[in-house]
Image (cartoon, rainbow, N blue to C red):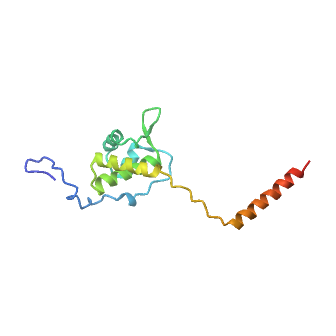
């Protein structure tokens, strides 16, 4: 949106309710089965300019493409998925860059917490039966020369 003088005016997250024509949601994009993607391929795939990807690399620590011997950025599938997730947070959900960074940090924390393993409840007769079986195996092993 522009004001009377032609300057671009930032819209509030509430005002950004419509999606630009021709833009695709992150869920609509199919990532090809490849090991590496060049920055131009990622830009076309995600429908973003390459300079935005380079800027996001400075703002989001989880977005770190490897560089080839010639200095070309080589994005892995995980990086492309991160770009799509960041794009959804910023463009679809209206997060600011700082807010998206914090949201991603919280997601990483919640993913790193492993739930406790549930131990199945065993009844006393089952445990007695298992112990007896183990004792029989031990007796067989001890009887061998």
Query: 142 or 47: which is nearer to us?
Result: 142
- Where, by quadrant of the figure, is residue 128 drawn? bottom right
Query: 10 or 98: which is nearer to us?
Result: 98
Please give the count of numbered marks on the rendered protein.
0
For the view shown, which residue lies furthest in the left direction? 4
- Compared to residue 93, the image places residue 69 above or below, namely above
Q: Where is residue 49 drawn, in percent x and y?
A: 31, 46
Residue 107 shows up from this direction:
yes
Query: 94 or 48: which is nearer to us?
Result: 94
Image point (60%, 59%), residue name: 119
Image point (36%, 40%), residue name: 57
Query: 95 or 70: which is nearer to us?
Result: 95
For the view shown, which residue lies furthest in the right direction? 145
Q: Where is residue 135 drawn, in percent x and y?
A: 80, 57
Q: Where is residue 71 drawn, in percent x and y?
A: 42, 33
Image point (75%, 64%), residue name: 129
- Where, by quadrant of the figure, is residue 137 drawn? bottom right
Residue 44 shows up from this direction:
no
The answer to whether 76 appears left or right of 58 in the picture is right
């Amino acid at each position: 949106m522009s004001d009377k003088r032609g300057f671009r005016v930032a819209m509030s997250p509430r005002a950004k309710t419509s999606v630009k024509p021709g833009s695709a949601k992150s869920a609509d994009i199919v990532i090809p089965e490849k090991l590496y993607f060049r920055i131009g391929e990622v830009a076309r795939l995600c429908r973003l300019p390459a300079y935005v990807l380079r800027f996001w690399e400075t703002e989001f620590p989880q977005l770190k493409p490897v560089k080839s011997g010639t200095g070309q950025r080589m994005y892995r599938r995980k990086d492309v998925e991160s770009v799509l997730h960041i794009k959804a947070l910023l463009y679809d959900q209206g997060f600011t860059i700082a807010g998206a960074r914090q949201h991603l940090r919280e997601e990483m924390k919640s993913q790193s917490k492993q739930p406790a393993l549930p131990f199945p409840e065993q009844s006393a007769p089952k445990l007695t039966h298992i112990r007896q079986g183990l004792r029989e195996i031990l007796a067989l092993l001890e009887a061998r020369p």
